[in-house]
Amino acid sequence: MRRERTVTRVALARALAALGGSLWPPLAALAFALAVSAGIVAAIGESPAAVLPLLFRQGLGSLDGFARVLFDATPLVLTGLSVAWAFRGGLFNIGAEGQLYVGAFCAAGLALALPGLPRWLALPAAVLAAALGGALWGAIPGWLRARFGVHEVINTIMLNFIAVGLTGYLVQRYLKEPGQMIPHTPRIAASYHLHPFAESAAGRALGLSPANPLGPSLLIALAAALAVWALLRWSVAGYRLRAVGQGPEAARQAGIPVGRVTWQAMAMSGALAGLVGVHDVLLYRHRFLDNFSSGLGFLGIAVALMGRNHPLGILLAALLFGFFSTGALEIDIFTEVPRELVVVLQALIILAVVSIGELAARARRRRRRAS
């Protein structure tokens, strides 16, 4: 019994050490970014002690505010998972922005084409359409990489422009709601709507305001995070993905079909990004709005980097960025500091995570060589 307890303590200590080793780079990056942002705020003439807490005051001040943070974090969880899944396969997917546009357009297009579907069929079909649309758009650069060796970074960047332009053209040319200046489609049928938690009895009992938009897309994002974690850890597909990411030539020698794993990885990555369409079309707007994303796909890269490409880390990083997004409004209203400061802060975090992560990796390599 005593030996078993000793083994348990040793395993727990090793797990905590590993957790600490993986957490300190993003925490150090956050501290660095906040310190630099404090200097920028002071240079503007405002008090950092008064401005920076506003980033978190709205989210921590009330349950309604925290629900708003969760709403802002939901699409970032999905785009962060999308980028991280490709990362695990040694691929750099910068195309989540285009993939989420195609996913949202497919969900809205299905709803407009088949408005009479019963609710029990309409919602699953729309969710599937969003995922398939994103998967198709993600599989294209994956296939080009696997078949011709074309680097996915160039492909995904170009496909972002094509996706935004193509969906915008289709909306303005064929699907625009008549009489509207803003280019968007008509509202989709009610059978496709996801309802915010605030409309439920539980939401009202918790005191959520009727305008709070948090809804079931959060549950979809959490389920996606759990599925990604389980697939990476327990499935054959996850094992093959990690093997290809760590050494494609070694994986090929071991009999793993590297080309197939590559395009499948990009398709899965695109499907996760495409689910953002469920959040925006089925829950929030109930229509497709041209240029609706404010860089959610690109922010997903930052979320994945800060979360160390781990689903739990991505959830925490998305939550932090959700605080930033909600707090930006507070800064804009209550201070003279422009809300663009939050964008600067996010960029600083990305730079710091990349730099500090590389420094930490170099330090580990030096320790291994010295031992």
Image (cartoon, rainbow, N blue to C red):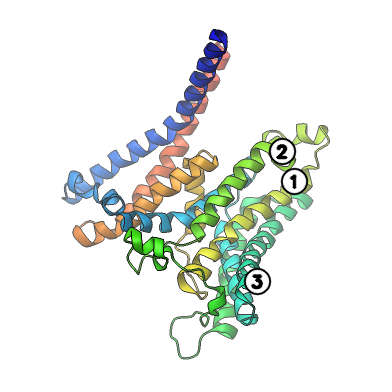
Count residues near mark 1 (Cα–Cα under 10 Å), then give few for <14, some for 14-19, many for 20+: many
Query: In terms of image quadrants, where is residue 353?
Result: top left
Do the residues bearing badges 3 and 2 touch, measured as CB atoms within 8 Å? no
**x and y, in percent, of residue 117 in the image:** 64, 78
Residue at 26% x, 58% y is 330
Q: Which residue is mark 2?
A: 244
Q: Is residue 247 visible?
A: yes
Q: Circle 3 sits in a helix, a strand or a loop, which is it?
A: helix
Would you say 136 lies left or right of 24 here? Answer: right
Indicate which label's residue lies in the foreground, 3 or 2: 3
Q: Along the line of sight, which residue is nearer the eye, 11 or 293? A: 11
Do the residues bearing badges 1 and 2 touch, measured as CB atoms within 8 Å? yes
Q: CA distance from mark 3 to mark 2?
A: 38 Å
Residue at 47% x, 47% y is 302
Q: CA distance from mark 1 to mark 2?
A: 8 Å
Amino acid at dot 2 = Val
Q: Which residue is mark 1?
A: 261
Give the mark count.
Answer: 3
Which comes sooner in the sequence, label 1 or label 2?
2
Would you say 12 lies left or right of 247 here? Answer: left
Marker disc for residue 121: 3
Residue at 48% x, 54% y is 76
